[in-house]
Image (cartoon, rainbow, N blue to C red):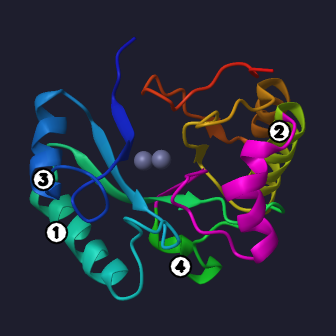
Amino acid sequence: MKIVSDCHTHTVWSDGKQEGDALVRAAIEKGLKRVVITEHGPRHLKAGLRGERIDGWLRMVDGLSKQYAGQIEVLPGIEANLVSLDGVIDVPTDRLADFAVVGVGYHLSGRGMRFIDNLFFQIGRRISNKAAASRRMTDAMIAAIEKNAVSFVTHPGHHLALEYGRLAAAAARRGTALEISARRGHLVLALKM
Ligand SMILES: [Zn+2]
Ligand SMILES: [Zn+2]
């Protein structure tokens, strides 16, 4: 399989290790035709891109896009956080158009919208019945892709196995891709009862 695009990357603006310029040059060296820079959404506690930083970051990506035009396509994206059990994501709808690619993922560092969401994300998810937690998280992710124009789900199965068949069927209906991540801890395949 020839990989032509990388649609999920982070720079030092969130929790990546490289500046945007080094990342784009590495993508060119790999022979990619397109790289999407996807920092974390604003409610990621450790590394979320928020407030006025979003505008500065968009200017940085636009600068790279112009600088490397003809060599590689550089696009702005975002890895939004799932922040409620009913599918709210942390990118305001009036800002969605700023991003060519919108991923949505669940992160331990993502802060939920309401007390009840945080209660589940931080505690209930771990102490409740694993099958029930899995079903609830799957429902939340399906709601997120049905409510929002989401390009892909980032690392489904991060920390908790999901009901993959049900999620995949919903994603297919919506034309949403699922990222398959081999990174450690990012794809829990089955429930450990
Ligand atoms: Zn990411
Ligand atoms: Zn992530």
Badge 1 is on which residue?
Answer: 63
- Location of residue 174 in the rendering, given as x and y in whole percent from the top left corner: 77, 44
Quick check: 91 left or right of 174? left
* Lower sequence index among marks 1 and 4: 1
* Lower sequence index among marks 3 and 4: 3
Who is closer to the viewer here, 123 or 78? 123
Can you tell which of label 1 and label 2 is closer to the viewer?
2
- Location of residue 26 in the rendering, given as x and y in whole percent from the top left corner: 13, 37
- Location of residue 173 in the rendering, given as x and y in whole percent from the top left corner: 82, 39
- Location of residue 38 in the rendering, given as x and y in whole percent from the top left corner: 39, 55
* Amino acid type indicated by mark 3: Tyr
Q: Secondary structure at mark 4?
A: helix
Badge 4 is on which residue?
Answer: 95
Quick check: 65 left or right of 77? left
Q: Residues within 10 Å of mark 3 (few under 14, many from 20)?
A: some
* Amino acid type indicated by mark 2: Ala
Can you tell which of label 1 and label 4 is closer to the viewer?
4
Badge 2 is on which residue?
Answer: 170
Check the image and report above or below for 161 versus 192. Answer: below
Q: CA distance from mark 2 to mark 4?
A: 25 Å
Q: Secondary structure at mark 1?
A: helix
* Lower sequence index among marks 1 and 2: 1
Q: CA distance from mark 3 to mark 4?
A: 25 Å
Magenta span? 100-129
Determine which quarter of the picture holds residue 6.
Answer: top left
Determine which quarter of the picture holds residue 112.
Answer: bottom right
Residue at 81%, 21% (x, y): give it.
Answer: 193
